[in-house]
Image: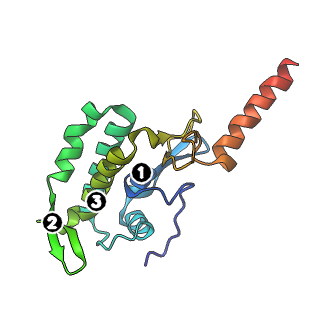
């Protein structure tokens, strides 16, 4: 169990977006949870991933984060090759069990497991609802979320933080004009 609590302002998103959210803004400066294995341990624990928080896993997770950023913030065309490079390190084995059909992931190198699972989760989100993968609408926020609102119109990573700042800015601009 990691000794450090999770310092990120937004957690609990699907694992692919949660990996993107290991970088966030605080007081105008980018913060990065994945600067070392201690931060990796925090991220692994937050996502229930049973994997060693070692240098190899950290390298692979950073590679997956960069690939996801290229696909989500850039375009699928830009990110596809990079995502595929991460996915090439694992495979899905289809099985039949007493409970019915199933799947299990297999890896030649277990250090790729968390990175691969994040990349695969992104493909699942693209299959489910690609239009609900969003970046926070606040100009200085770099967080991402999966919009689970009923009408699909969520704009902010958090109404209490970014949404409130945007409303306060609009209010200030209106009162300044008046």
Mark 3–mark 2 contact, CB under 8 Å? no
**Quadrant position of residue 133:** top left
Left or right, 160 with respect to 140, comes to right
Front-most of residues 128 and 110: 128
Q: Which residue is mark 3?
A: 117
Above or below — where is 152 with respect to 78?
below
Query: Between tags 1 and 2, which lies in front?
Result: 2
Q: Give the class, few, some or many, for how many residues have Cα within 10 Å of label 1's Cα (few <14, many ≥20).
A: many
Q: How is the model colour-coded? A: rainbow
Pick out the residue farthest to the bottom.
Answer: 98
Disc nearer the start of the sequence (1/2): 1
- Which secondary structure lies at badge 3? helix
- Res 93 quadrant in image: bottom left
Q: Residues within 10 Å of mark 2 (few under 14, many from 20)?
A: few
Tell me the residue at 76%/36% (across/down).
Answer: 168
* Residue corresponding to mark 1: 17
Closer to viewer: mark 3 or mark 2: 2
Instruction: Look at 35% across and 32% down and name the residue there.
Output: 74
Distance, label 3 to label 1, CA atoms, is 12 Å
| Nearer-N-terminus badge (3/2) | 2
From the viewer's perspective, is 110 left or right of 68? left
Q: Which residue is mark 2?
A: 94
């Amino acid at each position: 169990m990691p000794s450090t609590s999770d310092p990120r302002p937004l957690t609990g998103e699907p694992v692919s977006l949660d990996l993107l959210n290991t970088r966030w803004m605080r007081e105008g400066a980018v913060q990065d949870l994945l600067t070392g294995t201690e931060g990796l341990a925090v991220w692994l624990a937050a996502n229930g991933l049973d994997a060693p928080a070692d240098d190899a896993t950290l390298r692979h997770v950073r590679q997956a984060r960069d690939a996801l950023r290229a696909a989500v913030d850039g375009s699928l065309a830009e990110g596809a090759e990079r995502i595929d490079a991460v996915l090439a390190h694992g495979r899905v084995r289809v099985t039949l069990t007493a409970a019915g059909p199933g799947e299990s992931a297999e890896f030649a190198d277990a250090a790729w497991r968390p990175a691969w699972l994040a990349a695969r989760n992104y493909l699942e989100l693209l299959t489910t609802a690609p239009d609900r993968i969003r970046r926070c609408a606040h100009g200085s926020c770099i967080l991402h979320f999966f919009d689970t609102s009923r009408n699909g119109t969520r704009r902010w990573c958090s109404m209490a933080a970014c949404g409130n700042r945007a409303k306060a800015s609009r209010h200030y601009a209106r009162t300044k004009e008046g």
